[in-house]
């Protein structure tokens, strides 16, 4: 390893090499440090490490070489100065909010959020005096109107789950900074392969590493990427103290996932685009939500040199007949996995209104545009023709 060369490395090289500091054994693959604690040479060394006066490992809740390698690699891919790995994507959001917000603060969030994120804001942050206002993701005026003197954070997913709506990140970053706020972007759907929010002015990037960063549905984890102060100190302090930490074994799997991330995201995007075009002309489909289609309202943000390099690997579509019709399509599949997870090499399919967003009230789902006939597909790496044939079982029966 020659870390001094790292700033000049391309994306694929950074995804393979960053963060691996070989031990005296000279291992080629990153080792898994499955240890709870680390031994000090002396009492003085232990005291210096605990006081932050000397670098080194202390306890795997907050210092572990395998986890640190994953953090350094993801930070390099996202273009951030610091990364903190967590036990799950939701733990990453919780640690961010606990590290940056206090009682009396105000949060502005997109109403097009993952259901658990909305529940976290409304049911739990509210108990501790943090109020949340929800706005239309794609309406800059609504974001500006919602900001108060107490607002500290703007939070969004782009593309959103499950409708793949997109917000323009750079203007929102300017808006946040003009009011002394931070902008946090959940980059789970795009990954740094397709979109780099920090380069567009965002302050923090949130990941559910469970999804594309792993890529094979093997384990659960999360991460926050940003600057040395807000992430390296504030968010890290929460993880060190409260302990929603990533395990070394999971970090090792995520390191392996990052090695193939660019290749996988390109393949996912190509397959999803082909499937979206096929669905758009199917007589049983009322509407397809996919940023790579010209019919998508924010299609202008997609393409080389634009905010997002391609449409990504996730789409949703609507069928007539509400929940019964959507369930018939889903239940007719034999290839697709009926599961709410996404970002897997295997195609997954789910009914958002009764799964990922099922804990929201019917009114909240209606406001978010999540209808009973909506189906979400996270397109995997199978042959596209086989995925089409699998969906056609249910769609052709209802058309």
Image (cartoon, rainbow, N blue to C red):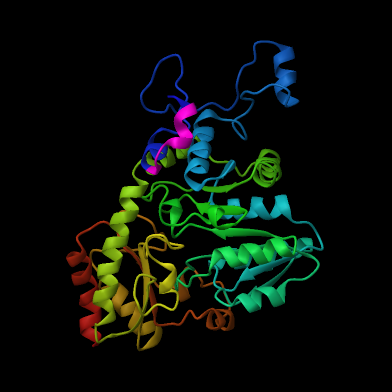
The magenta stretch spans which residues? 4-11
Q: Is residue 10 above or below residue 340?
A: above
Q: Is residue 274 above or below residue 204?
A: below
State left or right for residue 145 relative to residue 36. Answer: right
Is residue 5 part of the magenta span, yes or no? yes
Residue name at image x 30 percent, y 65 percent:
272
Q: Position of residue 51 (x, y in %)?
A: 76, 25
Q: Is residue 17 above or below residue 165?
A: above
Most foreground residue, 51 or 197: 197
Q: Position of residue 242 (x, y in %)?
A: 69, 43
Q: From the image, which quarter does the N terminus lie in?
A: top left
Q: Position of residue 391 (x, y in %)?
A: 24, 73
Residue name at image x 41 percent, y 52 percent:
193
Most foreground residue, 390 or 77: 77
Most foreground residue, 325 or 299: 299
- Farthest residue in the top direction? 42
């Amino acid at each position: 390893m020659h870390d001094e060369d790292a700033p000049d490395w391309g994306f694929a090289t950074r995804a393979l090499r960053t963060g691996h500091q070989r031990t005296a054994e000279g291992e080629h693959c990153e080792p898994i440090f499955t240890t709870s604690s680390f031994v000090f040479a002396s009492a003085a060394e232990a005291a210096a490490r605990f006081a932050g006066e000397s670098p080194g490992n202390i306890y795997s809740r907050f210092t572990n070489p395998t986890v640190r390698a994953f953090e350094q690699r993801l930070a390099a891919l996202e273009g951030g100065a610091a990364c903190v790995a967590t036990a799950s994507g939701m733990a990453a959001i919780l640690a961010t909010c606990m590290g940056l917000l206090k009682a009396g603060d105000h949060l502005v969030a997109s109403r097009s959020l993952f259901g658990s994120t909305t529940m976290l804001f409304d049911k739990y942050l509210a108990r501790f005096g943090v109020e949340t206002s929800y706005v239309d993701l794609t309406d800059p005026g609504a974001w500006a109107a919602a900001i108060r003197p107490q607002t500290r954070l703007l939070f969004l997913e782009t593309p959103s789950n499950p409708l793949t709506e997109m917000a323009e990140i750079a203007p929102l970053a300017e808006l946040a900074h003009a009011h002394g706020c931070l902008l946090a972007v959940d980059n789970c759907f795009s990954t740094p392969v397709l979109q780099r929010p920090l380069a567009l002015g965002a302050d923090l990037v949130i990941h559910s590493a469970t999804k594309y960063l792993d890529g094979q549905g093997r384990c659960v984890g999360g991460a926050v990427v940003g600057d040395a102060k807000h992430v390296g100190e504030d968010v890290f302090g929460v993880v060190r103290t409260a302990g929603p930490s990533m395990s070394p074994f999971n970090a090792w799997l995520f390191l392996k996932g990052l090695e193939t991330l660019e290749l996988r995201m390109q393949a996912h995007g190509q397959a999803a685009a082909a499937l979206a075009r096929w669905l758009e002309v199917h007589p049983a489909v009322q509407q397809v939500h996919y940023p790579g289609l010209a019919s998508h309202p924010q299609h202008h943000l997609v393409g080389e040199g634009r905010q997002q390099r391609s449409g990504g690997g996730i789409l949703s579509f609507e069928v007539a007949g509400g929940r019964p019709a959507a369930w018939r399509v889903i239940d007719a599949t034999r290839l697709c996995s009926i599961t709410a997870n996404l970002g897997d090499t295997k195609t997954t399919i789910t009914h958002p209104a009764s799964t990922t967003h099922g804990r929201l009230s019917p009114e909240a789902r209606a406001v978010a545009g999540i209808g009973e006939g909506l189906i979400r597909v996270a397109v995997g790496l199978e042959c596209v023709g086989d995925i089409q044939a699998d969906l056609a079982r249910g769609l052709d029966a209802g058309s």
